Image (spheres, rainbow, N blue to C red):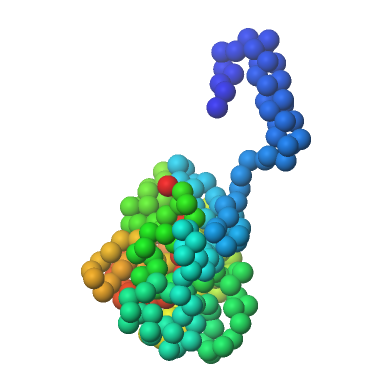
């Protein structure tokens, strides 16, 4: 950031000219400041900067790890069970009947078991699945800004909630998957974290529509969950 507090007039004009020149060059070459990130499948995600962190503003959709290895399709009950029994990373999409198309993927992303998260290769290169510390930093940042409320990270699709989504993080209410049933929870958000609780359990974040203060919600909502469960994933920049 260029400070102009002690600049003389010629210096100010020089700085302005340099900025205009840089913008003109970028515009000419179609190189504009990045506001999106693209995964290995070519899916494009919006991101937002909150304090010193950069978060995806959408749930992950990829069907490949960032090393180009295919993630196992676990949409059918049999496939979901087989992948989990074999401790293999798998994805599926939102529906409660086998064979339905993934029509909600564009808006809600896909669901992943924790074996996929544990690989460390789920997010685009340069990004990672957030851990408890990442969420704590977010809460501390919002507290310092006087915005330590879940309403500022919630998408306006939450039922019956007066949400502001001031951060643009757009956390969505979502269904999830157990072994192998789809559970309908339209007034609750679930997200995998990268923390490992035990050999058979990962760690998830759960926020419901009765949540209020973010720091308290994180203390109550970050809990262990079986590896075979299917939850959405957000990514945060390294």
Residue 60 place in picture, x, y as percent: 51, 64
Is 120 displayed left or right of 76 in the figure? left
Residue 113 place in picture, x, y as percent: 40, 73
Residue 90 vs residue 106, the one in the foreground: 90
Q: Residue reaching furthest right?
A: 28
| Quadrant hosting residue 222 | bottom left
Residue drawn 38% across the image and 85% down it:
81
Rendered position, 92 above or below 236:
below
Residue drawn 59% across the image and 86% down it:
100
Q: Residue reaching furthest left?
A: 198
Residue drawn 57% across the image and 52% down it:
37
Residue 94 place in picture, x, y as percent: 53, 79
Q: Quadrant of the N terminus?
A: top right
Residue drawn 49% across the image and 61% down it:
68
Rendered position, 103 above or below 134:
below
| Quadrant hosting residue 132 | bottom left
Rendered position, 51 above or below 118:
above
């Amino acid at each position: 950031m260029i400070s102009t507090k002690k600049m003389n007039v010629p210096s100010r004009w020089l700085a302005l000219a340099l900025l205009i020149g840089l913008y003109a060059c970028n515009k000419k070459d179609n190189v504009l400041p990045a506001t999106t990130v693209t995964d290995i499948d070519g899916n494009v995600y919006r991101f937002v900067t909150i304090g010193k962190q950069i978060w995806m503003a959408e749930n992950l959709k990829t069907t490949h790890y960032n090393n180009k290895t295919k993630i196992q399709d676990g949409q059918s009950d049999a496939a979901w069970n087989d992948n989990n029994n074999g401790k293999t990373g798998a994805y599926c999409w939102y529906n409660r009947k086998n064979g339905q198309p993934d029509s909600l993927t564009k808006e809600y992303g896909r669901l992943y078991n924790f074996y996929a998260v544990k690989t460390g290769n789920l997010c685009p290169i340069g990004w990672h699945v957030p851990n408890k510390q990442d969420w704590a930093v977010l809460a501390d940042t919002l507290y310092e800004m006087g915005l330590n409320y879940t309403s500022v990270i919630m998408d306006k699709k939450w039922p019956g909630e007066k949400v502001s989504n001031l951060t643009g993080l757009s956390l969505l209410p979502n269904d999830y998957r157990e072994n192998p049933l789809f559970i309908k929870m339209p007034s609750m958000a679930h997200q995998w974290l990268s923390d490992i609780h035990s050999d058979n359990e990962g760690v998830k974040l759960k926020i419901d529509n009765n949540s209020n203060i973010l720091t308290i919600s994180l203390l109550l909502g970050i809990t262990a969950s079986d590896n075979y469960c299917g939850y959405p994933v957000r990514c945060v920049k390294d």
